[in-house]
């Protein structure tokens, strides 16, 4: 079975939109084994519980980026993950270029997609031009 790891957060700083949208997007991967990795916050735990999602790895909310990438890579190698899918809006996506998944995808809102990802979905609706 194909496996995919989704990475997003929900907390006071970033809100819940990133995590919720990646959960809804994961619904399209019907025949995939889906896993989630998120910072351990009350909001994230509540969201996963309310959606009945069990395959979640929580990382400490104060993890630095090196520890986070190490945790991601350990999870990928330990679970045979083939695809890593990221939605993070509080730091530059290029930082995640060190993730060792065979296929890396992300959602970009800011028009600065990382060049070393296999798939970038641009969800920038041009709001800066509208307001």
Image (tube, helix red, strand yellow):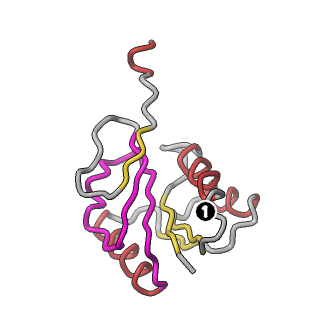
- Is 25 placed left or right of 59 in the picture? right
Question: Whole-percent x and y of residue 70?
Answer: 33, 75
- Is 46 placed left or right of 8 in the picture? right
The answer to which of 83 and 43 lies nearer the viewer is: 83
Question: Whole-percent x and y of residue 69?
Answer: 33, 69
Which corner quadrant of the image does residue 78 belong to? Answer: bottom left
- At 43% from the left and 66% from the top, the residue drawn is 84
Question: Whole-percent x and y of residue 18?
Answer: 53, 47
The answer to which of 52 and 59 lies nearer the viewer is: 52
| Secondary structure under the numbered disc 1 in the rendered image | loop
Residues drawn in magenta: 79-108
Answer whether residue 53 is magenta in the image. no
Answer whether residue 102 is magenta in the image. yes
The answer to which of 93 and 49 lies nearer the viewer is: 93
The residue sitting at the top extreme is 131
- At 50% from the left and 69% from the top, the residue drawn is 5
Question: Whole-percent x and y of residue 58?
Answer: 53, 70
The residue sitting at the left extreme is 115
- At 40% from the left and 57% from the top, the residue drawn is 105
Residue of label 1: 29
């Amino acid at each position: 079975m194909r496996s995919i790891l989704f990475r997003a957060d929900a907390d006071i700083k970033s809100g819940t939109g990133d995590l919720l949208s990646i959960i809804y997007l994961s619904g399209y991967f019907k025949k995939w084994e889906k896993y989630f990795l998120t910072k351990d916050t009350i909001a994230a735990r509540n969201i996963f519980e309310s959606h009945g999602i069990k395959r979640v790895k929580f990382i400490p909310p104060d993890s630095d980026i090196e520890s986070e990438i190490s945790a991601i890579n350990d999870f990928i190698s330990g679970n045979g993950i083939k695809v890593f899918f990221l939605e993070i809006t509080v730091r530059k996506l290029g930082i995640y270029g060190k993730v060792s998944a065979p296929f890396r995808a992300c959602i970009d809102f800011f028009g600065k997609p990382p060049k070393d990802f296999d798939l970038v979905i641009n969800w920038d609706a041009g709001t800066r031009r509208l307001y």
